[in-house]
C-alpha cells in the first residue's frame, strides 16, 4: 500500500494498480461535486493570501574537525588567599589594593587570552613562619572541549620554582560551585552579569587585573558561557611556604582529551620579605659602674618563650635580612625632669658566627646603628643571629635605677646588580636544607 498526502495535508489512500493520474482524476471529481468550480478557485485564492512572505535567509555554517580534538583553554587565572589562613577557607577580600595590574590577559567581550607566554599575572608573598598556615593560591581555568563542553579528560597545572625545578603538579576538579555561588548575579535590565565585591569574580577582575570586567560580565563573557554550559570551570590550589625561593614561578595549565593536549603558561611573582623576631623582651645590665663598660652577651639559641637573658634575633621571612638597632637615652627614674642624669652611649656586635661579629662602637642614643650586609651579618630564611650589647655610663653618674628603650629593625637586602645576596632564596634557587651559598 502506498500513502501520499494531498495538497490540503489529508492522507489519501491509493490502491495498488491505480496510476497517479487516475487518482488525481478521482480527487478532482470529488472536489467538483462537493464545492463546484467557483468554490475551488475561491478556496485556492484564500490559501494564497494567508501564506506569509518569507524572511531573508540566514546563513549557517559549521566546521567539522577543525584543529582536532584539543580542548580550548579560554582563560586561566590565579588568586591568593587574602587573609593567609587556609583553615577558614579561601577569602576573596576586597580590603586590599590589587596586587598587580596584569593588563587583563583575558581581554575583551570575546573571552580569549591575549598575553604572551610567560606573562606575570599576580604578585604574592608567603606567610612569616608559615603561620597560621602556608599561603594558599587558588588555580582557575575556563575550558571547553572542541566537540562538546564535556570533551575534556583532565585539567591540571604544573608549578615550577624560579630555577625550573618542579614544585608541584595540581589536579583540577570540575568546580561544583555555580557562577552565581562564586559571586555573579544577572542584571535583567542590561542583560549582563554583575559581580559582588569580595567574590571570586571580583578578585579575578577588579583586584588582580587578570580578567577584563567586560570579559566577565558581557552576554558573551565567561559567566554567561558557564551558566549556559558552553564552558566548564576547573579549580585547584597549592600551598606556598616561606622556605620556598623568591622570584618568578612558572604555571603551566594543561587540558587533555583522548591524548590531545592544550597548554598555556604564565608566571606568578613570589616576593621576598623579611620578618624580624627576638627571643628577649628586656636587656638588664644589672649593677653597672660609672666610667666603665658592661656587656649583655647573646647566643645562637632562639628561645621561643621570648624572655631569654641572652639576646638572639631570627628572620622568619624568606628574603635576606640585615639588623639595625636604636637606643633611647636611659634616664634616672628619681629625677622629676630628666635632663642631665642619663646614659646616652652604647655599643653592640652582631653576626651569625661568633668568630665574625661586626662591632658598632659607639652607638649614640637616638641614632640607628646598622650592622651592614656582609656575609655573616645577613640572616637568610629561618636563620638566627647573636646580638651582644654594651652600656657606657658616664663618670659621676649618681646611683639609682635608669631605664630606656631599645628598638630593633629588620631591613630587606634584595639581590641585585650592586649586591649579591648570600641567600639562595634571593636567587630563586631551591636546595633544601641549605638556605645560603657557601662563602668563597
Image (cartoon, helix red, strand yellow):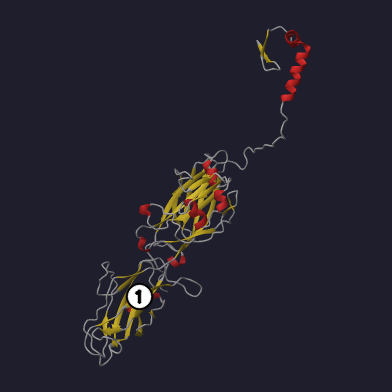
The residue that appears at 28% across and 73% down in the rendered structure is 281
In the image, residue 430 sits, relative to residue 215, either above or below, namely below
Q: Position of residue 361 (x, y in %)?
A: 35, 85
What percent of the width, then of the height, locates residue 42? Answer: 76, 17
x 45%, y 67%: residue: 426
Q: Looking at the rendering, which quadrant does residue 127 occupy?
A: bottom left
Residue positioned 32% across, 72% down in the render = 313
- Is residue 260 in view from this perspective? no
Question: Is residue 282 shown to the viewer in this render?
Answer: yes
Q: Quadrant of the N terminus?
A: top right
Tell which of 18 and 30 is nearer to you: 30
Residue 245 locus on image (x, y percent): 43, 63
| Rendered image quadrant of residue 297 | bottom left
Where's residue 347, x and y in %? Answer: 33, 83
In the picture, measured across the screen, residue 15 lies left or right of residue 211, that is: right
Locate the C terminus by quadrant.
Answer: bottom left
**Image vertical order of residue 425 relative to residue 231, above or below:** below
What residue does disc 1 label? 408
Q: Is residue 139 above or below residue 425?
A: above
Amino acid at each position: 500500500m502506498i500513502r501520499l498526502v494531498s495538497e490540503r495535508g489529508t492522507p489519501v489512500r491509493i490502491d495498488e494498480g491505480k496510476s497517479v493520474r487516475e487518482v488525481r482524476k478521482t480527487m478532482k471529481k470529488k472536489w467538483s461535486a462537493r464545492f463546484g468550480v467557483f468554490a475551488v478557485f475561491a478556496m485556492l485564492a484564500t490559501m494564497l493570501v494567508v501564506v506569509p512572505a518569507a524572511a531573508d535567509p540566514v546563513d549557517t555554517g559549521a566546521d567539522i574537525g577543525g584543529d582536532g580534538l584539543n580542548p580550548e583553554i579560554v582563560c586561566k587565572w590565579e588568586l591568593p588567599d587574602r587573609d593567609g589562613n587556609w583553615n577558614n577557607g579561601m577569602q576573596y577580600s576586597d580590603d586590599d589594593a590589587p596586587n598587580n595590574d596584569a593588563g587583563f590577559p583575558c581581554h575583551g567581550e570575546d573571552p580569549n587570552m591575549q598575553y604572551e607566554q610567560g606573562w606575570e599575572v599576580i604578585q604574592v608573598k608567603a606567610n612569616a613562619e608559615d603561620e597560621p598556615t602556608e599561603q594558599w593560591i587558588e588555580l582557575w581555568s575556563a575550558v571547553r572541549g572542541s566537540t562538546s563542553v564535556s570533551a575534556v579528560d583532565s585539567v591540571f597545572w604544573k608549578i615550577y620554582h624560579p630555577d625550573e625545578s618542579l614544585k608541584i603538579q595540581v589536579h583540577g576538579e570540575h568546580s561544583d560551585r555555580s557562577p552565581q555561588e562564586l559571586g555573579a548575579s544577572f542584571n535583567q535590565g542590561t542583560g549582563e552579569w554583575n559581580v559582588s565585591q569580595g567574590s571570586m569574580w571580583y578578585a579575578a577582575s577588579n583586584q588582580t587585573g587578570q580578567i577584563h570586567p567586560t570579559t566577565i560580565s558581557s552576554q558573551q563573557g565567561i559567566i554567561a558561557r558557564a551558566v549556559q554550559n558552553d564552558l566548564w570551570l576547573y579549580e585547584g590550589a597549592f600551598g606556598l611556604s616561606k622556605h620556598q625561593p623568591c622570584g618568578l614561578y612558572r604555571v603551566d595549565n594543561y587540558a587533555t582529551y583522548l591524548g590531545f593536549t592544550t597548554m598555556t603558561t604564565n608566571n606568578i611573582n613570589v616576593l621576598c620579605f623579611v620578618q624580624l623576631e627576638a627571643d628577649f623582651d628586656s636587656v638588664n645590665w644589672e649593677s653597672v659602674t660609672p666610667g666603665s663598660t658592661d656587656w649583655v652577651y647573646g647566643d645562637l639559641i632562639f628561645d621561643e618563650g621570648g624572655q631569654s637573658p641572652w639576646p638572639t634575633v631570627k628572620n622568619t621571612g624568606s628574603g635576606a635580612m640585615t639588623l639595625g638597632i636604636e637606643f633611647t637615652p636611659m634616664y634616672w627614674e628619681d629625677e622629676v625632669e630628666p635632663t642631665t642624669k642619663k646614659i646616652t652611649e652604647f655599643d653592640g656586635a652582631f653576626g651569625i658566627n661568633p668568630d665574625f661579629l661586626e662591632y658598632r662602637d659607639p652607638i649614640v642614643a637616638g641614632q640607628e646603628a646598622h650592622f651592614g650586609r656582609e656575609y655573616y651579618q645577613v640572616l637568610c630564611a629561618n636563620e638566627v643571629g647573636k646580638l651582644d650589647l654594651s652600656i657606657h655610663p658616664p663618670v659621676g653618674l649618681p646611683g639609682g635605677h635608669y631605664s630606656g628603650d631599645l628598638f630593633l629593625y629588620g631591613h630587606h637586602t634584595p639581590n641585585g646588580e650592586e649586591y649579591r645576596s648570600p641567600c639562595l632564596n634571593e636567587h630563586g634557587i631551591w636546595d633544601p636544607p641549605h638556605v645560603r651559598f657557601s662563602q668563597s
